[in-house]
Image: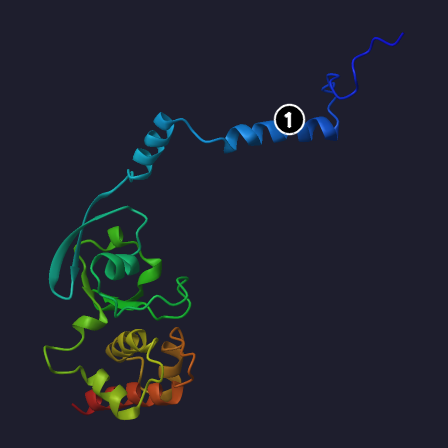
Amino acid sequence: MNLAPPASSAKQPNDGSRRSFIKQAGGLLGVALAPPFIGQAEHLTALSKTVAGVAPVQLRVNGTTRTLALEPRVTLLDALREYLHLTGTKKGCDHGQCGACTVHVNGRRVVSCLSLAVMNQHQEITTIEGLAKENELHPMQQAFLQHDGFQCGYCTPGQLMSGVACVQEGHATTDDQAREWMSGNLCRCGAYANILAAVRDVATQQTKG
């Protein structure tokens, strides 16, 4: 007489086979996906609301000093847009390749998506919102209007900030030079000819002045 238990109830050997591995993995996955106890859920919720590393960061933007509570990993771009609500500076590629987020730091153009906010403490930061003086447009803004240097307008703030710096650096004395030094700012609409005309116009006016 065969007294062996039915095949369905027989203990399966842990023989290192693929079937044994899948069964063990399935058991572990079930434990991992099981609903946590109430105490564990509350503990995880509390942890999710705690952000490690937050510290006060002072940024001087457009002549005003503001103190923000930021993580060290927050970029200057996100600090400007998400914390100071200065949304004129645009987030394009977020990889430093399009120039839409260009701002000035101590008069030097910087792609703010590649610069950490904490690295720019106590520096003079100028965004597109600080380019005009009250109701008087900056000469570069006036030139963009005159030469129709924009279409969709998304890249325009970065183009303006880069154009101002390009002229100040003396890198807009010829068409080819201006093209080279403005090459980090991309325009998907293809308004390059008009942008170039605006930058060169301002450069020529300053040379005459």
Question: Closest to the observer: 198 or 187?
Answer: 187
Which quadrant of the figure contains the N terminus? top right
Q: Residues within 10 Å of mark 1 (few under 14, many from 20)?
A: few
**Quarter of the view holding residue 20:** top right
**Residue at the limit of the structure toward the right, as seen here:** 1
Residue at far front of view: 1
**Residue 10 x/y as whole percent:** 75, 17
Residue 7 lies, in percent from the top left, at 79, 20
Dividing the picture into quadrants, the one containing residue 130 is bottom left
| Residue that appears at 40% across and 26% down | 37
Colouring of the image: rainbow
Compared with 123, 189 (above or below) is below
Q: Is residue 141 left or right of residue 114?
A: left
> The disc labelled 1 sits on which kind of residue?
Gln
Identify the residue shown where x is 35% and y is 66%: 91
What is the quadrant of residue 133 in the picture? bottom left
Nearest the viewer among 71 and 181 is 71
Figure disc tally: 1
Q: Measuring from the top left, give residue 136's x and y in whole percent.
A: 12, 83
Q: Which residue lies at the image location 40% right of the left edge and 70% below the top edge?
A: 98
| Above/below status of 201 relative to 155 | below
What x and y, as percent, mark residue 166? 29, 77
Q: Quadrant of the C terminus?
A: bottom left
Is 146 on the left or on the right of 36, as rendered? left
Would you say 53 lies left or right of 28 here? left
Vertically, is 105 above or below 13? below
Residue highlighted by disc 1: 24
Q: Secondary structure at mark 1?
A: helix
Foreground of the two, 155 or 174: 155
